[in-house]
Image (tube, rainbow, N blue to C red):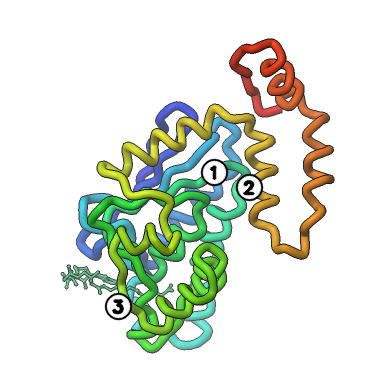
Amino acid sequence: MIEVARDGAVAVLTIDRQDALNALNVETLTELRDRLRELADDAGVRAVVLTGAGDKAFVAGADIKYMSGLGPDEARAWGGLGHEAASLLETMPKPAVAAINGFALGGGCELALACDLRYASSRAKLGQPEINLGIVPGWGGTQRLARVCGIAVAKDLIYSGRTIDAEEALRVGLVNAIADPVLETALEVAHGLAEKAPLALAAAKSLINRSPAALGADAEEFGALFASADTKEGLTAFLEKRKPEFRGA
Ligand code: CAA
Protein backbone atom coordinates (compact mmCIF):
# COMPACT_ATOMS: atom_id res chain seq x y z
CA MET A 1 0.00 0.00 0.00
CA ILE A 2 0.94 3.63 -0.41
CA GLU A 3 0.65 5.95 2.53
CA VAL A 4 0.32 9.69 1.94
CA ALA A 5 1.03 12.00 4.86
CA ARG A 6 0.96 15.78 4.78
CA ASP A 7 3.45 17.84 6.73
CA GLY A 8 2.49 21.42 5.89
CA ALA A 9 3.18 21.99 2.19
CA VAL A 10 5.22 18.78 1.97
CA ALA A 11 3.65 15.43 1.10
CA VAL A 12 5.39 12.23 2.17
CA LEU A 13 4.64 9.13 0.10
CA THR A 14 5.61 5.87 1.75
CA ILE A 15 5.68 2.62 -0.21
CA ASP A 16 4.73 -0.10 2.24
CA ARG A 17 5.03 -3.72 1.20
CA GLN A 18 7.58 -4.77 3.71
CA ASP A 19 7.21 -8.55 3.37
CA ALA A 20 8.68 -8.14 -0.14
CA LEU A 21 11.15 -5.35 0.74
CA ASN A 22 8.66 -2.88 -0.78
CA ALA A 23 8.97 -4.47 -4.24
CA LEU A 24 6.25 -3.13 -6.49
CA ASN A 25 3.46 -5.36 -7.75
CA VAL A 26 0.63 -4.15 -10.01
CA GLU A 27 -1.56 -3.08 -7.12
CA THR A 28 1.15 -1.07 -5.34
CA LEU A 29 2.54 0.51 -8.49
CA THR A 30 -0.94 1.49 -9.72
CA GLU A 31 -1.69 3.06 -6.35
CA LEU A 32 1.64 4.90 -6.43
CA ARG A 33 0.88 6.23 -9.93
CA ASP A 34 -2.58 7.39 -8.82
CA ARG A 35 -1.31 9.14 -5.67
CA LEU A 36 1.45 10.84 -7.69
CA ARG A 37 -1.15 12.13 -10.16
CA GLU A 38 -3.12 13.68 -7.31
CA LEU A 39 -0.07 15.26 -5.70
CA ALA A 40 1.14 16.62 -9.04
CA ASP A 41 -2.16 18.50 -9.42
CA ASP A 42 -2.47 19.61 -5.79
CA ALA A 43 -1.38 23.26 -5.64
CA GLY A 44 -1.24 23.05 -1.84
CA VAL A 45 1.62 20.56 -2.10
CA ARG A 46 4.91 22.27 -2.91
CA ALA A 47 7.32 19.36 -2.51
CA VAL A 48 7.02 15.57 -2.40
CA VAL A 49 9.18 13.12 -0.47
CA LEU A 50 9.24 9.48 -1.59
CA THR A 51 10.42 6.76 0.78
CA GLY A 52 9.97 3.11 1.74
CA ALA A 53 8.43 1.71 4.91
CA GLY A 54 10.63 -0.01 7.49
CA ASP A 55 14.38 0.17 7.85
CA LYS A 56 15.44 -2.33 5.19
CA ALA A 57 14.27 -1.07 1.84
CA PHE A 58 13.31 1.93 -0.23
CA VAL A 59 12.07 -0.33 -3.05
CA ALA A 60 13.75 -3.67 -3.93
CA GLY A 61 12.53 -3.33 -7.51
CA ALA A 62 9.67 -4.57 -9.60
CA ASP A 63 8.03 -7.72 -8.25
CA ILE A 64 10.05 -10.58 -9.72
CA LYS A 65 7.42 -13.20 -8.95
CA TYR A 66 4.83 -11.22 -10.92
CA MET A 67 7.23 -10.61 -13.81
CA SER A 68 8.15 -14.28 -14.09
CA GLY A 69 4.69 -15.02 -15.52
CA LEU A 70 4.54 -12.18 -18.06
CA GLY A 71 4.48 -12.44 -21.86
CA PRO A 72 5.85 -9.62 -24.06
CA ASP A 73 2.61 -7.62 -24.28
CA GLU A 74 1.96 -7.77 -20.56
CA ALA A 75 5.58 -6.87 -19.90
CA ARG A 76 5.24 -3.85 -22.20
CA ALA A 77 2.19 -2.68 -20.25
CA TRP A 78 4.06 -3.26 -16.98
CA GLY A 79 6.96 -1.18 -18.28
CA GLY A 80 4.45 1.49 -19.29
CA LEU A 81 2.96 1.66 -15.81
CA GLY A 82 6.39 2.12 -14.24
CA HIS A 83 7.13 4.83 -16.78
CA GLU A 84 3.95 6.67 -15.85
CA ALA A 85 4.94 6.73 -12.18
CA ALA A 86 8.53 7.76 -12.93
CA SER A 87 7.42 10.45 -15.40
CA LEU A 88 5.07 11.94 -12.83
CA LEU A 89 7.94 12.30 -10.37
CA GLU A 90 10.10 13.81 -13.10
CA THR A 91 7.56 16.21 -14.56
CA MET A 92 5.37 17.26 -11.62
CA PRO A 93 5.77 21.03 -11.26
CA LYS A 94 7.32 20.72 -7.80
CA PRO A 95 10.43 19.01 -6.48
CA ALA A 96 10.41 15.30 -5.65
CA VAL A 97 12.95 14.13 -3.09
CA ALA A 98 13.87 10.46 -2.58
CA ALA A 99 14.71 9.35 0.95
CA ILE A 100 16.56 6.08 0.25
CA ASN A 101 16.34 4.18 3.50
CA GLY A 102 17.71 0.79 2.35
CA PHE A 103 17.67 -1.24 -0.88
CA ALA A 104 16.92 0.82 -3.99
CA LEU A 105 17.31 -1.79 -6.69
CA GLY A 106 16.04 -2.11 -10.23
CA GLY A 107 12.73 -0.25 -10.49
CA GLY A 108 13.42 1.20 -7.01
CA CYS A 109 16.61 2.84 -8.21
CA GLU A 110 14.74 4.02 -11.32
CA LEU A 111 12.03 5.73 -9.26
CA ALA A 112 14.72 7.39 -7.15
CA LEU A 113 16.44 8.54 -10.36
CA ALA A 114 13.21 10.15 -11.53
CA CYS A 115 13.19 12.30 -8.38
CA ASP A 116 14.94 15.65 -8.41
CA LEU A 117 17.12 14.95 -5.39
CA ARG A 118 18.24 11.75 -3.69
CA TYR A 119 19.39 11.28 -0.09
CA ALA A 120 20.62 7.91 1.16
CA SER A 121 20.98 6.43 4.61
CA SER A 122 24.48 5.11 5.30
CA ARG A 123 23.07 1.57 5.02
CA ALA A 124 21.46 2.11 1.61
CA LYS A 125 22.32 -0.19 -1.29
CA LEU A 126 21.61 0.88 -4.84
CA GLY A 127 21.86 -0.70 -8.24
CA GLN A 128 20.31 -1.92 -11.46
CA PRO A 129 20.55 -5.71 -11.11
CA GLU A 130 18.19 -6.45 -14.02
CA ILE A 131 20.95 -7.97 -16.14
CA ASN A 132 21.18 -10.77 -13.58
CA LEU A 133 17.55 -11.61 -14.33
CA GLY A 134 18.09 -11.49 -18.08
CA ILE A 135 16.28 -8.19 -18.48
CA VAL A 136 17.14 -4.50 -18.67
CA PRO A 137 15.94 -1.57 -16.57
CA GLY A 138 12.39 -1.01 -17.84
CA TRP A 139 11.31 2.19 -16.12
CA GLY A 140 13.71 4.72 -17.63
CA GLY A 141 16.90 3.72 -15.79
CA THR A 142 19.12 3.48 -18.85
CA GLN A 143 18.50 7.11 -19.77
CA ARG A 144 18.16 8.63 -16.32
CA LEU A 145 21.18 6.86 -14.79
CA ALA A 146 23.29 7.97 -17.76
CA ARG A 147 22.00 11.51 -17.39
CA VAL A 148 22.57 11.67 -13.63
CA CYS A 149 25.91 9.80 -13.37
CA GLY A 150 27.30 9.79 -16.91
CA ILE A 151 27.38 7.06 -19.52
CA ALA A 152 30.45 5.26 -18.11
CA VAL A 153 28.87 4.80 -14.68
CA ALA A 154 25.52 3.79 -16.19
CA LYS A 155 27.21 1.15 -18.34
CA ASP A 156 29.24 -0.15 -15.40
CA LEU A 157 26.20 -0.51 -13.15
CA ILE A 158 23.72 -1.73 -15.76
CA TYR A 159 26.11 -4.17 -17.49
CA SER A 160 27.48 -5.62 -14.24
CA GLY A 161 24.25 -5.51 -12.27
CA ARG A 162 26.35 -4.91 -9.17
CA THR A 163 24.96 -3.25 -6.09
CA ILE A 164 26.80 -0.28 -4.63
CA ASP A 165 26.81 1.12 -1.11
CA ALA A 166 25.92 4.66 -0.10
CA GLU A 167 29.55 5.86 -0.18
CA GLU A 168 30.03 4.74 -3.76
CA ALA A 169 26.62 6.11 -4.73
CA LEU A 170 27.72 9.49 -3.40
CA ARG A 171 31.06 9.30 -5.19
CA VAL A 172 29.43 8.59 -8.57
CA GLY A 173 26.77 11.27 -8.05
CA LEU A 174 23.85 8.88 -7.76
CA VAL A 175 22.85 10.48 -4.46
CA ASN A 176 23.19 14.07 -3.33
CA ALA A 177 24.22 13.22 0.23
CA ILE A 178 24.32 10.50 2.87
CA ALA A 179 22.24 11.29 5.92
CA ASP A 180 21.01 9.49 9.01
CA PRO A 181 18.13 9.48 9.69
CA VAL A 182 17.54 10.02 6.00
CA LEU A 183 13.84 10.87 6.13
CA GLU A 184 14.53 13.73 8.53
CA THR A 185 17.07 15.23 6.13
CA ALA A 186 14.83 14.72 3.09
CA LEU A 187 11.99 16.46 4.95
CA GLU A 188 14.23 19.34 5.95
CA VAL A 189 15.31 19.80 2.33
CA ALA A 190 11.72 19.51 1.08
CA HIS A 191 10.47 22.12 3.57
CA GLY A 192 13.25 24.46 2.46
CA LEU A 193 12.20 24.01 -1.17
CA ALA A 194 8.52 24.48 -0.29
CA GLU A 195 9.39 28.03 0.79
CA LYS A 196 10.83 28.97 -2.59
CA ALA A 197 8.81 30.67 -5.32
CA PRO A 198 6.75 27.77 -6.77
CA LEU A 199 6.58 29.08 -10.34
CA ALA A 200 10.30 29.73 -10.55
CA LEU A 201 11.04 26.31 -9.04
CA ALA A 202 8.71 24.61 -11.54
CA ALA A 203 10.34 26.51 -14.41
CA ALA A 204 13.84 25.57 -13.19
CA LYS A 205 12.82 21.89 -12.95
CA SER A 206 11.31 21.88 -16.40
CA LEU A 207 14.34 23.61 -17.93
CA ILE A 208 16.91 21.35 -16.26
CA ASN A 209 14.99 18.27 -17.39
CA ARG A 210 14.95 19.34 -21.02
CA SER A 211 17.39 17.86 -23.48
CA PRO A 212 20.38 19.99 -24.57
CA ALA A 213 18.50 20.57 -27.83
CA ALA A 214 16.19 22.82 -25.80
CA LEU A 215 19.02 25.19 -24.87
CA GLY A 216 17.72 28.69 -25.37
CA ALA A 217 14.22 27.80 -24.19
CA ASP A 218 15.19 29.23 -20.84
CA ALA A 219 14.91 32.78 -22.20
CA GLU A 220 11.23 32.12 -22.94
CA GLU A 221 10.52 30.61 -19.50
CA PHE A 222 12.60 33.33 -17.85
CA GLY A 223 10.58 36.04 -19.57
CA ALA A 224 7.24 34.38 -18.79
CA LEU A 225 8.00 34.40 -15.06
CA PHE A 226 8.08 38.18 -15.10
CA ALA A 227 4.30 38.14 -15.51
CA SER A 228 3.96 36.56 -12.06
CA ALA A 229 3.42 38.32 -8.75
CA ASP A 230 5.96 36.04 -7.10
CA THR A 231 8.77 37.23 -9.36
CA LYS A 232 7.96 40.84 -8.51
CA GLU A 233 7.72 39.89 -4.85
CA GLY A 234 11.09 38.09 -4.91
CA LEU A 235 12.90 40.96 -6.60
CA THR A 236 11.21 43.61 -4.49
CA ALA A 237 11.76 41.77 -1.22
CA PHE A 238 15.48 41.62 -1.96
CA LEU A 239 15.62 45.35 -2.57
CA GLU A 240 13.57 45.98 0.57
CA LYS A 241 15.87 43.67 2.55
CA ARG A 242 13.02 41.44 3.73
CA LYS A 243 12.03 37.77 3.35
CA PRO A 244 9.79 37.24 0.30
CA GLU A 245 6.32 35.77 0.66
CA PHE A 246 5.57 33.55 -2.31
CA ARG A 247 1.98 32.60 -3.19
CA GLY A 248 2.37 30.51 -6.32
CA ALA A 249 0.95 33.04 -8.74
N1 CAA B 1 10.35 -8.94 -6.12
C1 CAA B 1 9.63 -9.78 -5.36
N2 CAA B 1 9.98 -10.12 -4.10
C2 CAA B 1 11.12 -9.61 -3.61
C3 CAA B 1 11.92 -8.72 -4.36
C4 CAA B 1 11.48 -8.38 -5.67
N3 CAA B 1 12.16 -7.50 -6.45
N4 CAA B 1 12.99 -8.37 -3.62
C5 CAA B 1 12.86 -9.02 -2.44
N5 CAA B 1 11.74 -9.76 -2.43
C6 CAA B 1 11.22 -10.62 -1.36
C7 CAA B 1 12.00 -11.92 -1.28
O1 CAA B 1 11.53 -12.84 -2.25
C8 CAA B 1 11.71 -12.36 0.14
O2 CAA B 1 10.42 -12.90 0.20
P1 CAA B 1 10.15 -14.31 0.98
O3 CAA B 1 10.53 -14.00 2.39
O4 CAA B 1 8.72 -14.54 0.77
O5 CAA B 1 11.08 -15.28 0.35
C9 CAA B 1 11.65 -11.02 0.90
O6 CAA B 1 11.44 -10.02 -0.09
C10 CAA B 1 12.94 -10.69 1.61
O7 CAA B 1 13.99 -10.77 0.67
P2 CAA B 1 15.32 -11.66 0.91
O8 CAA B 1 15.03 -12.83 1.82
O9 CAA B 1 15.91 -11.98 -0.42
O10 CAA B 1 16.21 -10.61 1.72
P3 CAA B 1 17.79 -10.49 1.71
O11 CAA B 1 18.10 -9.47 2.76
O12 CAA B 1 18.43 -11.83 1.84
O13 CAA B 1 18.19 -9.91 0.27
C11 CAA B 1 17.97 -8.44 -1.61
C12 CAA B 1 17.77 -8.63 -0.10
C13 CAA B 1 19.48 -8.45 -1.94
C14 CAA B 1 17.40 -7.08 -1.95
C15 CAA B 1 17.26 -9.56 -2.38
O14 CAA B 1 15.93 -9.67 -1.91
C16 CAA B 1 17.20 -9.33 -3.86
O15 CAA B 1 18.19 -9.52 -4.56
N6 CAA B 1 16.02 -8.90 -4.38
C17 CAA B 1 15.81 -8.70 -5.79
C18 CAA B 1 16.39 -7.37 -6.23
C19 CAA B 1 16.23 -7.17 -7.73
O16 CAA B 1 16.75 -7.93 -8.53
N7 CAA B 1 15.51 -6.11 -8.12
C20 CAA B 1 15.29 -5.78 -9.51
C21 CAA B 1 14.00 -6.37 -9.97
S1 CAA B 1 13.82 -6.21 -11.72
C22 CAA B 1 13.19 -4.67 -11.99
O17 CAA B 1 13.04 -3.88 -11.09
C23 CAA B 1 12.85 -4.41 -13.41
C24 CAA B 1 12.59 -2.99 -13.77
O18 CAA B 1 13.44 -2.29 -14.25
C25 CAA B 1 11.26 -2.45 -13.64
Residue 157, x across and y down, in percent: 40, 76
Q: Which residue is denoted by mark 2 in the rendering?
A: 205
| Pointers 1 and 2 in contact (C-beta within 8 Å) | yes
Residue 103, x across and y down, in percent: 28, 62
Q: Which residue is denoted by mark 1 in the rendering?
A: 95
Mark 3 close to ligand 1, CB under 8 Å: yes
Residue located at (44% from left, 37% from top): 189
Q: Examine the rendering and report whether any part of residue 193 can be seen.
A: yes
Q: Amino acid at mark 3?
A: Lys
- Which dot, 3 or 2, sits closer to the camera? 2
Q: CA distance from mark 1 to mark 2?
A: 7 Å
Q: Is residue 227 left or right of residue 179?
A: right
Q: Residues within 10 Å of mark 2 (few under 14, many from 20)?
A: some
Q: Quadrant of residue 183?
A: top left
Ligand 1, image quadrant it occupies = bottom left
Q: Amino acid at mark 2?
A: Lys
Q: CA distance from mark 3 to mark 2?
A: 36 Å
Residue located at (52% from left, 50% from top): 116
Q: Quadrant of the C terminus?
A: top right
Which sits in the foreground, 195 or 37? Answer: 195
| Pointers 3 and 1 in contact (C-beta within 8 Å) | no
Residue 10, x across and y down, in percent: 46, 34
N-terminal label among 3 and 2 = 3
Residue 242, numbered circle: none
Q: Which residue is denoted by mark 3 in the rendering?
A: 65
Q: Amino acid at mark 1?
A: Pro
